[in-house]
Image (tube, rainbow, N blue to C red):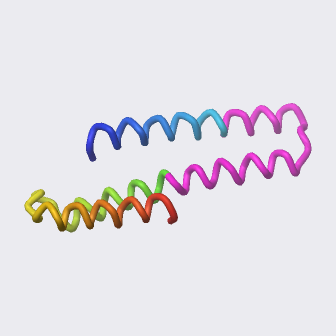
């Protein structure tokens, strides 16, 4: 995983962690169920995005473990990984 990717993923996970703490606080304060459910759904979607980013990274490493693909192939692989992370 590249340093920039790692930094972005760690930042995403920190935001998710904050969301989950917020949901916990909402439950402790007896917030409305629908509001809690909405925040849980947002947290789940954020975690799913993090998962797809990790899967894209895993695919890149499995297909080109030695980083020996031609530049054009690497670019196509990166594009596919980006699409997976974005729309997965």
- Residue 5 location in percent, x, y? 34, 43
Please state which of residues 12 and 71 is positioned toward the viewer in this rendering: 71
Magenta region, residue range: 20-49
Instruction: Name the residue rendered at 52%, 54% in the picture.
Output: 49
Classify residue 52 by image quadrant. Answer: bottom left
Please state which of residues 24 and 57 is positioned toward the viewer in this rendering: 57
Left or right, 9 with reference to 67: right
Left or right, 39 with reference to 7: right
* Residue at the extreme front of the image, as rendered: 72
Instruction: Name the residue rendered at 30%, 64% in the picture.
Output: 59
Q: Report the label total.
A: 0
User: For the stretch drawn in magenta, what is the main secondary structure?
Assistant: helix
Above or below residue 63? Residue 29 is above
Classify residue 16 by image quadrant. Answer: top right
- Residue 87 location in percent, x, y? 51, 64
Please state which of residues 72 and 22 is positioned toward the viewer in this rendering: 72
Left or right, 36 with reference to 85: right
Question: Is residue 39 on the magenta stretch?
Answer: yes
Classify residue 22 by image quadrant. Answer: top right
Instruction: Name the residue rendered at 50%, 65% in the picture.
Output: 88
- Residue 72 location in percent, x, y? 17, 65
Please state which of residues 36 and 57 is positioned toward the viewer in this rendering: 57
Question: Is residue 44 on the magenta stretch?
Answer: yes
Instruction: Name the residue rendered at 72%, 49% in the picture.
Output: 40
Left or right, 35 with reference to 47: right
Above or below residue 42? Residue 18 is above
């Amino acid at each position: 995983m590249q340093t920039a990717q790692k930094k972005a993923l760690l930042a995403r996970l920190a935001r998710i962690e904050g969301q989950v703490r917020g949901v916990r606080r909402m439950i402790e304060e007896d917030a409305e169920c629908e509001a809690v459910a909405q925040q849980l759904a947002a947290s789940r979607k954020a975690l799913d995005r993090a998962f797809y980013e990790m899967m894209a990274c895993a695919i890149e490493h499995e297909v080109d473990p030695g980083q020996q693909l031609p530049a054009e192939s690497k670019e196509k692989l990166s594009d596919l990984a980006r699409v997976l992370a974005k729309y997965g």
